[in-house]
């Protein structure tokens, strides 16, 4: 699947996938900590040409000419800020392809929540440990999970994208797929 996606975007494009572990590892190591987002993202970050961002719970993996640029400073800027990897995707004209899930499973919409701000996310509220580039374990601040439900309902996001004709539907293999300009998802959210 990763090879097919890379072929579809071409040599000048960049492919980003979540390689989140959602805090499952007691110490996050970008070279060894598996992701919990499924077999495709877990296989992608392990590819030799992939760059993985340094974040204790929500790292991303990127392949392409701007991979280093997308991944830089993830730990310092937070998960969903405009200058985070996913924020750069949203504000840089990127697309989101959802395979087998709806867009309410995408964390990219959190970029919109943080920009409002909705007040239900804290990017630096919990302590975590990561293995830095120097190989040393360091204490960092990372995501504090939602204190409660977000004040904005998710249920209507895909319906609104469809009503406004902002997303395309199709199949990739047996999976239902939706493709949307990331900024359109941001605007709807």
Image (cartoon, rainbow, N blue to C red):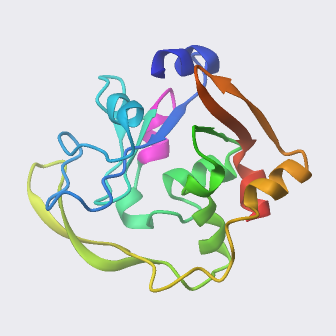
Q: Nearer the viewer, residue 162 or 109?
A: 162
Q: Which residues are magenta?
A: 63-71
Quadrant showing the C terminus: bottom right
Residue 65 among those drawn in magenta: yes
Residue 93 among those drawn in magenta: no
Residue 122: x, y in percent? Answer: 44, 79
Q: At 23% from the left edge and 58% from the top edge, which residue is drawn? A: 24
Q: Where, by quadrant of the figure, is residue 110 drawn?
A: bottom right
Q: Nearer the viewer, residue 82 or 143?
A: 143
- Residue 9 placement, left or right of 159: left
- The answer to whether residue 75 is above or below residue 47 is below
- Residue 125 placement, left or right of 69: left
- The answer to whether residue 41 is above or below residue 173 is below
Residue 112: x, y in percent? Answer: 66, 67
Q: At 64% from the left edge and 33% from the top edge, which residue is drawn? A: 176
Q: At 76% from the left edge and 34% from the top edge, which residue is drawn? A: 169
Residue 3: x, y in percent? Answer: 47, 15
Residue 135: x, y in percent? Answer: 10, 49
Furthest residue toward left: 136
Task: Answer whether residue 59 is visible to the viewer in this image.
Answer: yes
- Residue 179 placement, left or right of 141: right
Furthest residue toward front: 174
Q: Nearer the viewer, residue 38 or 77?
A: 38
- Residue 121 placement, left or right of 54: right
Q: Nearer the viewer, residue 139 or 143?
A: 143
Q: At 63% from the left edge and 61% from the top edge, which residue is drawn? A: 109
Task: Answer whether residue 108 is visible to the viewer in this image.
Answer: no
- The answer to whether residue 179 is above or below residue 188 is above
């Amino acid at each position: 699947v990763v090879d097919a996606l890379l072929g579809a975007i071409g040599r000048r494009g960049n492919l980003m996938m979540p390689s989140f572990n959602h805090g499952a590892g007691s110490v996050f190591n970008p070279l060894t900590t598996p992701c919990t987002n499924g077999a495709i993202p877990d296989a992608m970050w392990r590819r030799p040409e992939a760059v993985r961002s340094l974040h204790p719970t929500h790292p991303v993996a990127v392949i392409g000419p701007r991979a280093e640029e997308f991944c830089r400073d993830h730990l310092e800027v937070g998960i969903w800020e405009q200058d985070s990897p996913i924020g750069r995707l949203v504000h840089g004209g990127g697309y989101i392809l959802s395979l087998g899930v709806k867009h309410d499973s995408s964390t990219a919409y959190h970029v919109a929540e943080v920009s409002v701000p909705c007040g239900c996310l804290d990017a630096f509220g919990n302590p975590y440990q990561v293995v830095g580039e120097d190989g040393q374990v360091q204490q960092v601040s990372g995501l504090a999970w939602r204190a409660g439900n977000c004040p904005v309902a998710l249920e209507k996001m895909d319906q609104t994208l469809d009503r406004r004709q902002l997303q395309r539907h199709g199949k990739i293999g047996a999976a239902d797929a939706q493709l949307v300009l990331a900024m359109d998802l941001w605007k709807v959210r």
